[in-house]
Amino acid sequence: MNESKKDVVELDAHSHKRGRGIYLLPNLFTTAALFSGFYAVLAAMNAQFEKAAVAIFIAMILDGLDGRVARMTNTQTAFGAEYDSLSDMVAFGLAPALVMYEWALYTLGKPGWLAAFIYTAGAALRLARFNSKLDVADDRYFQGLPSPSAAAIVAASVWVAVDHDISGENLAVVAGLITGLCGLLMVSNVRYNSFKHIDLKGKVPFFTVVGIALVFAIILMQPPLILFLVFALYALSGLAGAARSFFQH
């Protein structure tokens, strides 16, 4: 999700009348992310589930770039923020639900499409809540599981199963639980670290770079499994933090 939207709100509040055109560069990345989500749906409809999962992860990368490009080039606009939200809804709301439904949930009948709808509605509600609380939200945390992370869990779980030649019919119930739970976590009040406090421009020790290289090497060894574990642990981290806060109070 484009976390620069808060800056856009502040920028537009003090800006004068803009021209009729729109900035091309950041919106190219947003359009590419939108296309990746659209392609994931088409791939799933043609039973190409691995391609569908990869397309969702590509959309995540592109979605992370559009905001950074906008900030670097000083081309943040309200139009770009709204366009980014619509792209997020397709790539991280609709596409993962349809991919999971086409792979496994259809075998469950009504419970299957209900799980897919819960996920889709959860993504839509989370985006709406995020956009409505830009001026009061704590930048250090997300309220609810971010939709890209939820999409990553759904897409990676399909990717892992396909990579190991496991049929969706054999994991339909598990797929339904994963999909529904991700949808509910998106609209929950569970707080997740945004990692925005990390200074990417500052200097780091040499061995930090070596560690990053090792992380990439580990991911490349088994991309679907490692990505699933990373995002699943991130989802569980929020639940663990919520449980710790509950018992402390």
Image (tube, rainbow, N blue to C red):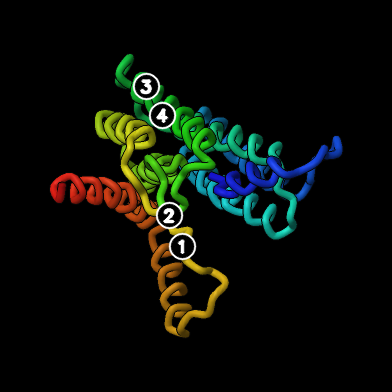
Tag 1, which secondary structure? loop
Q: Which residue is mark 2?
A: 140
| Left or right: where 117 falls relative to 54 | left
Label 2 – label 1 distance at C-alpha: 7 Å
Q: Which residue is mark 3?
A: 106
222 in relation to 212, above or below = above
Label 3 – label 2 distance at C-alpha: 38 Å
Q: Nearer the viewer, mark 3 or mark 2?
A: 2
- Answer with the quarter of the image where residue 246 lies: top left
How crowded pointer 2 is (Cα within 10 Å; few <14, some 14-19, many 20+) is rated as few
- Answer with the quarter of the image where residue 55 lies: top right
Q: What amino acid does circle 4 point to?
A: Gly
| Left or right: where 11 falls relative to 217 | right
Looking at the image, tell me whether mark 2 or mark 1 is earlier in sequence order. 2
Q: What amino acid does circle 2 point to?
A: Arg
Looking at the image, tell me whether mark 4 or mark 1 is earlier in sequence order. 4
Looking at the image, tell me whether mark 3 or mark 1 is earlier in sequence order. 3
Q: Nearer the viewer, mark 3 or mark 4?
A: 4
Q: Which residue is mark 1?
A: 197
